[in-house]
Amino acid sequence: MKEREHTLNERPPSAVDRTGGGVRMHRFKGKLPAHAPRTAGLVAIVAALVAVVAVSSAGAKTTRTSAASVVFMSTQLTPVTEQQKFIDVTLKGFPGSVQFVPANAPSDLVTRLNAEAQAGNGQVSLAGATVGDLETVSDKLIDLSDVAAKLKTAGIPQSLWDQAKLGTNKQLSIPWMQATYLMCANKKALPYLPKGANLNSLTWGQFAQWGANLQKKFGTPEIGFPVAGLFPRFLEGYLVPSFTGRLVTKFESKEDAAAWLYLKNLWRFVNPQSTQYAFMQDPLLSGEVMVAWDHVARLTSALQQKPNDFVLFPAPRGPKGRGFLPVLATVGIPKTAPNPTDAKSLILFLDNISQQARTITEHGFFPVVGGKLSKKLDEGSLALAAAVKLQQAQKDAIASVLPIGLGAQSGAYAKVFTDTFTRMVMNKEDPMTVLKDEGNQLQQLLTAAGAACWQPDAKSTGVCQVGG
């Protein structure tokens, strides 16, 4: 088995909150405690963190004549190898100094920005995270309408601009990069698709039959999932919404039980090593599996190394539609930023067509800008970009978003889904009993976080309520 980790930058649930499944992250020491003290003590902690930033970002600078630096704290690109690519390749050519500080969990970034806001003095000039995480500190960010105006011709879709407003009517952040999750298959598996099946419009029923056909032909289970990786995102954004059309508000329903029972049936055709897989590109390259689901960043290597061997396609659809999970990362500037001018310049640099092309080639994420990328991308990366667009364009798509407003409960949220999977699919416990037990856990953590519902559930005015 082969492994490599990455996140949009999604980290698996177990690693941070997880964002999804089993990452070994580079940590910088001295992060703020969950309940940081105020006033003088808070200022001291912020000062200590500033020193940490200087240590953590050693070597993370681009050349520049000015002494001022942009301290860029991000929940994305946090694995050490990804940090280095970002520093050495993506930032190359920026006429300024950048200190990149990885936030190993969304709560690290949120706590840091809240502490600097309370202290009235900050060191972070640019913050990068998924929209759901930045939304929790939206009141700490400045309006970036002036930057948005300069990117008016960049071809950024209006839907992304709207998400980047973070639930307000102001442009509090700017789209940076996006990702999603796709299905990938070795072309040798295609002859065994069910009769009449279209790869780009499969149903989950046809997918299971495909798995059965492959196992009959090759004698081994040929489907793979990254259970040690971002698997919770499959459960939350793909499986359940496809069967229920919702997520939290249908968690204890019979439709939800049908989704899990489907997965239980499908698991007969899933490679047992899936419980150990964190990235599916390696099992695909080695031939351990022929069909897999994963984050686009964790399929990139297979597509780049052997573009003629693999094909990407949208996830199958269920009774309610084709559930999928687009992920948008944006960047915002804190009100306490010491260097907002250069931070704005860095935003414009990151949304340049050349740097955007590198989000695919170097980081496995999809650009947010329009423009001609064909001359800047290899064959595998172009296939990845085309597949992402195809999945977004499906008429029966049910788009979800990453959880919003969970804060410290993010890990517990992911655990509800992995525990449900373990109990129902692996241990074969009674479906409704499991859903009732885990539904209670889900409601408790939603209440503790004070989190309202998010897509695909209708937005609620109060705490999101688990339903059946």
Image (cartoon, rainbow, N blue to C red):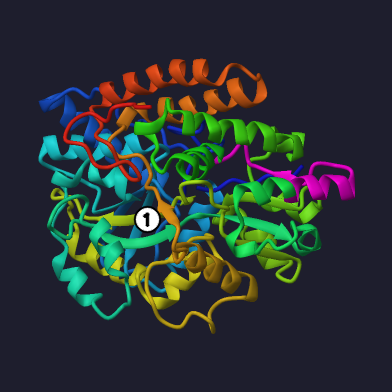
In the depicted structure, whether residue 313 falls above or below residue 73? below
Q: How many numbered discs sit on the rendered protein?
A: 1
Q: Is residue 250 a member of the stretch shown in magenta?
A: no
Q: Evaluate whether residue 89 shows in this view.
A: no
Say which residue label 1 marks: 328
In the depicted structure, whether residue 449 falls above or below residue 65? above
The x and y percentages for residue 460 are 21, 37
The x and y percentages for residue 155 are 33, 77
Q: Is residue 214 a member of the stretch shown in magenta?
A: yes
Residue sitting nearer the eye, 394 or 153: 394
Q: Amino acid at mark 1?
A: Leu
Residue sitting nearer the eye, 247 or 169: 247
- The residue under the point 68% across, 34% down is 265
Position of 439 with respect to 344 (left or right) is right
Viewport quadrant of the C terminus: top left
- The residue under the point 53% across, 80% down is 376
Position of 129 with respect to 363 (left or right) is left
Identify the element where label 1 is drawn.
strand
Residue sitting nearer the eye, 219 or 104: 219
- The residue under the point 36% across, 71% down is 94
Q: Evaluate whether residue 295 shows in this view.
A: yes
Position of 324 with respect to 163 (left or right) is right
The x and y percentages for residue 66 are 26, 67
In the depicted structure, whether residue 129 falls above or below residue 89? above
The x and y percentages for residue 223 are 73, 46
Viewport quadrant of the N terminus: top right
Q: Which of the 4 quarters of the picture holds residue 143?
A: bottom left
Position of 191 with respect to 371 (left or right) is right
- The residue under the point 45% across, 43% down is 241
- The residue segment tinted magenta is 210-230
